[in-house]
Image: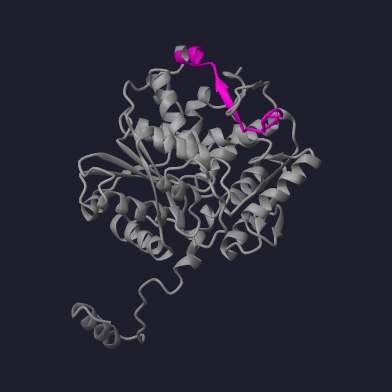
Amino acid sequence: MGYVKDLKCRECGREYPVAPVYVCEFCFGPLEVVYDYKSIKKVLTRKVIERREKNLWRYKELLPIDGEPLVGLNSGYTPLLKADNLAKEFGVKELYIKDDTVTHPTLSFKDRVVAIALTKAREFGFDTVACASTGNLAHSVSAQGAKAGFKRFIFIPATLEASKIVASLIYEPNLIAVNGNYDDVNRLCSEIANKYRWAFVNINIRPFYAEGSKTHGFEIIEQLGWKAPDNVIIPCASGSLLTKIWKSFKEFKEIGIIKELSTKVFASQATGCSPISTAIKQGTDVIRPVKPDTIAKSLAIGNPADGYYATQVVNETGGWGEDVSDQEIIDGIKLLARAEGIFAETAGGVTVAVTKKLIESGKIGRDETTVICVTGNGLKTQEALNGQTISPYYIKPNIGSFEEVLQKIRRGGK
């Protein structure tokens, strides 16, 4: 038996029974999962967690399932890497990368949320799962849904990178490419979800699905030696990841896993789609929708569902919101690869480049502990780097030709 008490409207506080619903029928506010923390505190300790398998289910009491996990048994517990080379580059004392580019089956943090969503979909009795996606979620629902035996309908913008489309098609879902941006796709999926009894992981299953992002935050605290960082930099698309990482930190404090919590939370976006960071800079909680125009397509949500709540978290913690240009994103990807040997997708380039800006502006102290969230593998967005990398050396198949090039390399030339 799980520890979920009910669902609660974030706006009016009205409570709902646990069911595949996601919006308050009275005020249309989003619904949030509420837990029985007093009972969880009695059974979940550091020692209990440490004895468990190294996957996201090691925190299962704080996840919204009733029975045992059904999918995602190979997801989670990704590395937290001490980034000494990048710290030196930025001139800071202690910097870490929470690296979700590896370990996960489809190489992004979306495997966390999908593991929860599909387990819950099975508990609710659905036989078909679906999603609206900018790429990574499509891969995860396609892959994990295949393994779990679900019928799958995946909806994406037709302009998505070719490599991301192939990475979904390989699992043979029903892939629907919509002529429009993500917000157009999401609106269409909301209509479909109201007509068909399908588990749309980021619509009617959204309250449960979103809870999976907390495992990213739980792991950060555990891997830091059971303490929260001074700063955490999080990429924002819908804003959900940011709000859930903060929720995970607060939950660990609520049940006594950590004693102190003074983390500042920072929102990072691409300038070409920055409704959340813009609102923060303007000192407002009004999220003005934008039309996305950025290479960071995994973050290209112009009307973010959790944008308002993300700004609240940032303000509550004393953090900030920042955005970076497409060229800065590319530079961030290349810097992370060169300094730490991590190939991140465009969202990772965003967080790295934003961290650089935050340090240079004094928003992040140079003697503080900072964690950069890198949420997806660069193999997913190679198109963004076309023409942006160094060129190979072309030689003839003989030693003389090689040594000509070697001399150029030693002289520092091409």
| x and y, in percent, of residue 230 in the image | 29, 35
| Residue 81 appears left or right of 141 | left
Where's residue 313, x and y in %?
A: 44, 35
Q: Is residue 15 above or below residue 111?
A: above
Quarter in which the C terminus is drawn? bottom left
* Apparent side of residue 234 relative to residue 336 in the rendered image (left or right): right
What residue occupies the far right of the structure in this picture?
195
Residue stretch rendered in magenta on the structure: 20-41
Q: Specify the quadrant of the image occupied by residue 402.
A: bottom left
- Please state, as top left, top right, bottom left or bottom right, where the N terminus lies in the image: top right
Nearer-the-camera pick, 322 or 35: 322
Q: Residue 289: x, y in percent? A: 57, 51
Q: Nearer the viewer, residue 405 or 221?
A: 221
In front: 393, or 282?
A: 282
Q: Is residue 334 above or below residue 257?
A: below
**Residue depicted at 48% across the width and 66% down the height:** 384
The mark tally for this picture is: 0
The quarter of the displayed image where residue 226 is located = top left
Image coordinates for residue 119, horizontal then vertical, percent: 63, 32
Residue drawn at (36%, 87%), measured in percent from left and top? 396
Residue, x 75% and y 40% (percent of image)?
198
Judge whether residue 36 is colored magenta. yes
Q: Is residue 394 above or below residue 309?
A: below
Residue 153 shows up from this direction: no
Task: Confirm whether the magenta stretch covers residue 137.
Answer: no
Q: Tell me, yes or no, if residue 279 can be seen here.
A: yes
Question: Which of the 4 image quadrants contains residue 64?
Answer: top right
